[in-house]
Amino acid sequence: MIRRLCGLALALALTAAAGAGTAQAETRTGQDTPGKRVYNGMQIAFGPDAPNLFCTIGAVGTDDHQRHIAISAGHCLGDPGKKYADREIPENVAPVYHRQDIGYGPIGYVRYFKDPEGSQTGHATKDYMVIELLPQVTLSSQGPYLKQTGEVKYPQGPVSPNALKPALDNERLLTTGNNEIITSGQTGVWYGTVMNNDNGIYRAPAPNKAGDSGGPVIWHVPGTDLPSQANNFQAAGPWAGITKAITLQLPPFNYTSSANILADLRAREAADPAHNIFGAGFEVTANP
């Protein structure tokens, strides 16, 4: 099922990538003002001079070290020299800006992004990015259209290919044909049935376009309201993933599951001698 709610024409899914190795932090006076709100659906740029090379935040919250964290798509950054991809990045070499408020300065810094390993649409199962947000920003669960209520837990679902054993409930995948996801982006808010699950990459007839990569996906909790004109196109539900790509398969719109992201974060934390991986133990903020 698909509904066009307030959409425009579709475009290519893959956003142009900014170079991680060349990004430089800048000090702006806006950072001295506390309380800037960061939320799912916020458009982000990776350099003050390139606002048209942008992606979108999929979820914000905290990790198990109580750091402020945002999740987006790994393919939003490129690293031809393989200097920063696939490792923790404690250096502030890849600042992240609110696209509509570049003058504020960086709202955070990329701490990890997965190399696509030759894919034009991001890594097959681990296409995500971890951003450490500045401690003075205010985290919000309320995006322009979607309010996120924790993370989806689906104990009856198949296990993410990235999960350790035993898998946690939030590392299990939505089954196809009987689950709907709701997404939002530049063309509005959409929903559709999960028609295919390929190792934790969902395909659904819920459109996305260039720049939406990394943006929010929630699970439609059965019995709750779908977005419509009657509720100003708003919806609430647990975080279920992020926007990934448009491909030639049908339906063409691809989404990386939250289960794949959370499972990989936990696996990388378990393998780290210091058990200090940015984003591990991620939980969506409960702040309104």
Image (cartoon, rainbow, N blue to C red):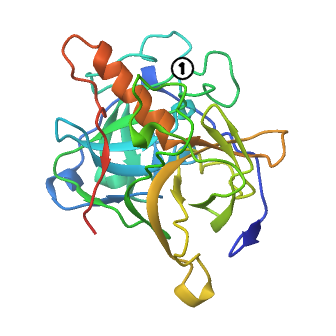
Foreground: 273 or 157? 157
Q: Residue 4's spot in the image, x, y percent?
A: 74, 72
At 37% across and 28% down in the image, what residue appears? 265
Quadrant in which residue 140 is drawn: bottom left
Q: Quadrant of the C terminus?
A: bottom left
Foreground: 60 or 271? 271
Is residue 42 visible from the viewing direction of this image? no
Q: Amino acid at mark 1?
A: Asp
Vertical placement of residue 33 versus 188, above or below: above
At 69% across and 52% down in the image, what residue appears? 194
At 53% across and 28% down in the image, what residue appears? 126
Q: Residue 276's spot in the image, x, y percent?
A: 21, 23
Foreground: 38 or 206? 206
Foreground: 222 or 258? 222
Q: Which residue is mark 1?
A: 115
Question: With 6 as the anchor, is 248 left or right in this view?
Answer: right
Q: Secondary structure at mark 1?
A: loop
At 70% across and 44% down in the image, what residue appears? 13
Q: Residue 237's spot in the image, x, y percent?
A: 45, 64
Question: With 15 as the anchor, is 281 left or right in this view?
Answer: left
Q: Residue 36's spot in the image, x, y percent?
A: 25, 60
Rate crowding at label 1 as few (under 14), some (14 to 19) or many (20 or more) other CA atoms within 10 Å: many
Is residue 214 visible from the viewing direction of this image? yes
